[in-house]
Amino acid sequence: MRILLLSLSLCASLLLMSCSSDIHDYADTQPRFELDRFFNGELVAHGMVQDRSGRVLRRFTVEMLGRWDGNQGVLEEDFVYDDGERQRRVWHLEKGPDGQYSGSAADVVVPAIGQTRGFALNWRYTLAVPIDGEVWNIDFNDWMYLLDENRVLNRAEMTKWGFKIGEVTLWIERKI
């Protein structure tokens, strides 16, 4: 019986994985998302972290400042969580050919690699996240959608050992 349940679980997981979005699904959409254009200047984001059941664990705001010099960019992020905790992350970004981007930061264990197609960006990376006095390496499957020239909706699925442990959702706006 246990083997049957394991087999059914594996089949269900494979079926769900085959239904996931692919960046090429957005190739013909507009407006085109270019990180070096959107993440250039001052931005603000509002977001939340949810556990795997959808329960909101934390809410936060992020003040951002992006600067680009050619294909090299820096994105400074200053987080303020609803419990008063503050966090800073500085991304070092690089624009590659054909909508490809990469990024690294001090707490990014595996650098972000991804690409844009149409109005979407998908990139994956591993982030060192402090949890209950320990540091866990959490894998992020990060999707950003350019809604218009001033707004991006960002949704990231967090996994550990291949199992979903939560999601992060952000609304990012350019300061005008």
Image (cartoon, rainbow, N blue to C red):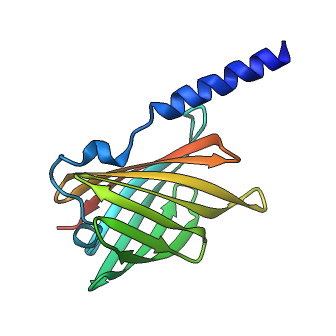
Q: Is residue 160 left or right of residue 33?
A: right
Q: Is residue 142 left or right of residue 127?
A: left
Give the farthest residue toward the bottom. Answer: 69
Is 89 placed above or below 159 here?
below
**Which residue is found at the position 36% from the left and 71% from the top?**
64
Is 82 placed above or below 7 here?
below
Quarter of the figure with residue 94: bottom left
Q: Nearer the viewer, residue 117 or 76?
A: 117
Q: Note whether residue 47 is visible.
A: yes
**Which residue is found at the position 60% from the left and 72% from the top?**
107
Say how many tags the image has: 0
Q: Quadrant of the N terminus?
A: top right
Rendered location of residue 62, percent (x, y): 41, 64
Q: Nearer the viewer, residue 126 or 129?
A: 126
Rendered location of residue 120, percent (x, y): 29, 51
Rendered location of residue 54, percent (x, y): 55, 33
Rendered location of residue 169, percent (x, y): 43, 47
**Which residue is found at the position 34% from the left and 74% from the top?**
96
Give the farthest residue toward the top. Answer: 1
Q: Note whether residue 49 is visible.
A: no
Is 26 placed above or below 174 here?
above
Q: Quadrant of the C terminus?
A: bottom left
Give the farthest residue toward the right. Answer: 2
Q: Is residue 48 left or right of residue 42?
A: right
